[in-house]
Image (cartoon, rainbow, N blue to C red):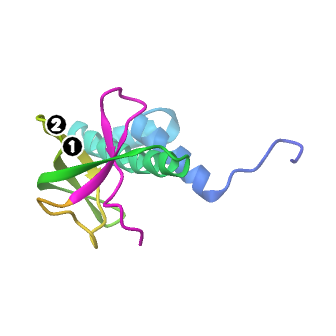
């Protein structure tokens, strides 16, 4: 530890800047909001939100959170990309449940799920009753 505290890594600094830009706070956020229109700024916020949900899933999996299998009912491309991976609307149905629900998530373009495929979900701690996409359960 130095005199002024721990120095942040590039990844931590980039995540902080992206968070400020998406929230519209600070220099980066105000600049982003000023140069983008309202609809484009909303798209940036959605993309950052999808990226952050992927990070949350990785942390929950590393902590040993239980996963829930579900069957893909349908998948629709939103037209957005995050790190060249598509953001999709995924309609899934857990086994034994009558209701289906939709998740907007990033999927690997190498392993895009198809209707009928099994995927894994994790309960979302930020939204009780909600789920996060945890992949197809196959390790790369």
Q: Image point 36% across, 28% down: which residue?
A: 127
137 magenta-colored: yes
User: Which residue reaches farthest top?
Assistant: 128
Residue 101 screen position, x and y as percent: 17, 38
For this view, does 120 lie left or right of residue 65?
left
Which stretch did the figure color magenta?
A: 118-140
Q: Secondary structure at mark 1?
A: loop
- Disc assigned to residue 5: none
Q: Image point 47% across, 32% down: which residue?
A: 25
User: Which residue reaches farthest front?
Assistant: 96
For this view, does 1 lie left or right of residue 118?
right
Between 66 and 53, the one lying in front of the other is: 66
Q: Which residue is mark 1?
A: 94
**Image marks 2 and 1: residues in contact by CB distance under 8 Å:** yes
Figure check: 122 above or below 119: above
Between 119 and 108, the one lying in front of the other is: 119
- Disc assigned to residue 97: 2
The picture quadrant where one finds residue 43 is: top left
Residue 27 screen position, x and y as percent: 51, 38
The picture quadrant where one finds residue 113 is: bottom left
- Give the prevailing secondary structure in the magenta stretch: loop
The quadrant in which the C terminus is found is: bottom left
Q: Image point 78% across, 47% down: which residue?
A: 6
58 magenta-colored: no
Figure check: 26 above or below 84: above
Please rate how many residues cluster around mark 2, counting C-alpha atoms within 10 Å: few if below 14, some from 14 to 19, many from 20: few
User: Is residue 35 in view?
Assistant: no
Residue 59 screen position, x and y as percent: 52, 48
For this view, does 114 lie left or right of residue 124?
left
Residue 9 screen position, x and y as percent: 67, 56
């Amino acid at each position: 530890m130095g005199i002024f505290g721990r120095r942040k890594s590039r990844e931590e600094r980039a995540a902080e800047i992206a968070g400020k830009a998406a929230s519209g706070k600070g220099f980066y956020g105000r600049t982003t909001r000023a140069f983008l229109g309202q609809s484009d700024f909303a798209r940036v916020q959605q993309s950052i939100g999808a990226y952050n949900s992927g990070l949350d899933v990785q942390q929950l999996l590393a902590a040993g959170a239980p996963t829930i299998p579900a069957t893909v009912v349908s998948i629709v491309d939103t037209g957005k990309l995050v790190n060249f991976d598509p953001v999709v609307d995924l309609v899934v149905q857990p086994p034994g449940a009558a209701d289906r629900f939709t998740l907007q998530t990033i999927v690997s373009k190498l392993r895009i799920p198809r209707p009928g495929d099994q995927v894994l979900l994790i309960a979302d701690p930020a939204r009780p009753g909600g789920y996060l996409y945890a992949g197809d359960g196959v390790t790369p």
